[in-house]
Image (tube, grey):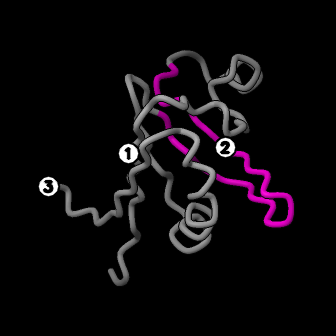
Amino acid sequence: MLGVSCRILTVSSGVELVDLAPELARHFSTNGTPVMIGGGVLAHTIVGVAHNRESGEVRYLVLDPHYTGPDNLQTIHSKGWVGWKKPDFWAKTAFYNLCLPLRPLSF
């Protein structure tokens, strides 16, 4: 419809998102586009991932696209509308779809 190419990834549980951390990191380094994620009744945008290969620790930089209000960064951050989230942020019982928009190879 809009002509945007993307990759779709799915996981059957929020726990499985940890396994996608290397792939998400690769996506951000090669495409740099935000990842839309939806599961259950929630939708968020992942704009970054920190993955420590040695320890296996993962954090997701999550933006909640439902925020409405003034452009007050302190409020947005302190109320959790944007921030680094641990893997337990994602529901263990929810199925998730991820949309990874791809940049065009040529213009």
Q: Is residue 53 magenta?
A: yes
In the rendered view, tell whether residue 107 sits above or below residue 16: below
Percent x, y for residue 101?
39, 60
Which amino acid type is shown beneath numbered disc 1? Asn
Q: Alpha-carbon neighbours of circle 2 within 10 Å: few (<14), some, or many (≥20)?
A: some
Horizontal side, residue 83 vs residue 67: left or right: right
What residue did someone put label 1 on? 97
Q: Is residue 31 above or below residue 85?
A: below
Mark 1 to mark 3 CA distance (whole Å) = 19 Å
The type of residue carrying mark 2 is: Leu
Quadrant in which residue 82 is drawn = top right
Looking at the image, residue 49 lies above or below residue 69 = below
Q: What residue sits right under mark 3 in the picture?
A: 1
| Residue 63 falls left or right of residue 43 | right
User: Furthest-bottom residue in view?
Assistant: 106
Residue 3 as seen in the image, left or right of residue 28:
left
- Seen as rendered, the residue at the extreme right is 54
Secondary structure of residue under mark 2: strand
Magenta residues span 44-67
**Residue 61, label in figure:** 2
Circle 1 SS class: strand
x 41%, y 33%: residue: 39
Residue 95 forms part of the magenta stretch: no
Closer to the camera: disc 1 or disc 3?
Answer: 1
Instruction: Please provide percent x and percent y for residue 65.
Output: 48, 30
Q: Position of residue 29 (x, y in %)?
A: 62, 70
Q: Residue at x 44, y 31 (%)?
A: 94
